[in-house]
Amino acid sequence: MIDWDRLMEEAKTAREMTYTPYSHFPVGAALLGASGKIYRGINIENASYPLTICAERVALFSAYSMGERGFLALAIVTNAPTFSSPCGACRQVLVELAPGMPILLANLAGERMLTDSSSLLPFPFTPESLLGQPGSD
Ligand code: THU
């Protein structure tokens, strides 16, 4: 049973730590690992705009770098008028590292929507897509 309220609170706390001087669009994420640990993620922007990284990938990469290998749930919080959804790049990373993982999209007004990483990216390019190609092991 996922404690979504706890995960949302973590994402809200994370959202206060973003580096978003250009977009002024702070995003907070909180990822629940199979170990029970929660990993926060924030968007971090850069004066060289495309180098910006999203909150979702920061949470996933942080967890992965700490040795976490199973991912149970992700909460994403913004202050958008309606909850906002992960960008295409994050969906690609999410579906590979955490296929089928439930994702709660929420805003500060308390609106919420539950989805999952696989629904967000139909017909994905996956590790299996590479099998049988010249040069693949
Ligand atoms: N952003 C995220 O952190 N996650 C998303 O899924 C969508 C966009 C960030 C990137 C940038 O810092 C700001 O939101 C506006 O695009």
Image: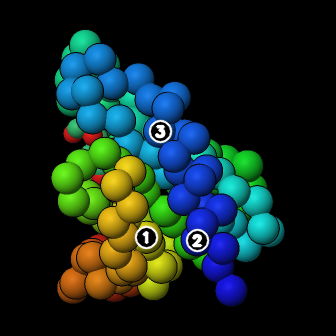
Residue that sits furthest to the top in the current view:
47
Label 3 to label 1: alpha-carbon separation: 15 Å
Q: Secondary structure at mark 1?
A: strand
Q: CA separation, marks 1 and 2?
A: 8 Å
Mark 1 sits near ligand 1, with its Cβ under 8 Å away: no
Q: Is residue 119 visible?
A: yes
- Residue 130: percent from left, percent from top: 33, 76
- Where does the image place residue 41, in percent across and percent down from the top left? 52, 44
| Mark 3 neighbour class, 10 Å CA radius: few under 14, some 14 to 19, many 20 or more | many
The residue under label 2 is which amino acid type? Trp
Q: Mark 2 sits on what residue?
A: 4
Of callouts 1 and 2, which one flags the residue occurring earlier in the amino acid sequence? 2
Disc 3 marks which residue? Answer: 15
Q: Check whether the beta carbons of the residues at disc 1 and disc 2 lie within 8 A of each other.
A: yes
Left or right: residue 66 compared with residue 28: right
Q: Which quarter of the figure has residue 46?
A: top left
Residue 84: give x, y in percent of width and height.
25, 58
The amino acid at mark 3 is: Arg
Of pointers 3 and 2, the one earlier in the residue sequence: 2
- Which of marks 1 and 3 precedes in the sequence? 3
The residue depicted at 53 percent of the width and 50 percent of the height is 11
Q: Residue at x 39, y 79 (%)?
A: 114
The CB of the residue at mark 3 lies under 8 Å from ligand 1:
no
To which residue does mark 1 refer?
A: 104
Residue at 22 percent across and 20 percent down: it is 22
Separation of disc 3 and disc 2 at Cα? 16 Å
The amino acid sitting under disc 1 is Leu
Relative to 42, 71 lies left or right? right
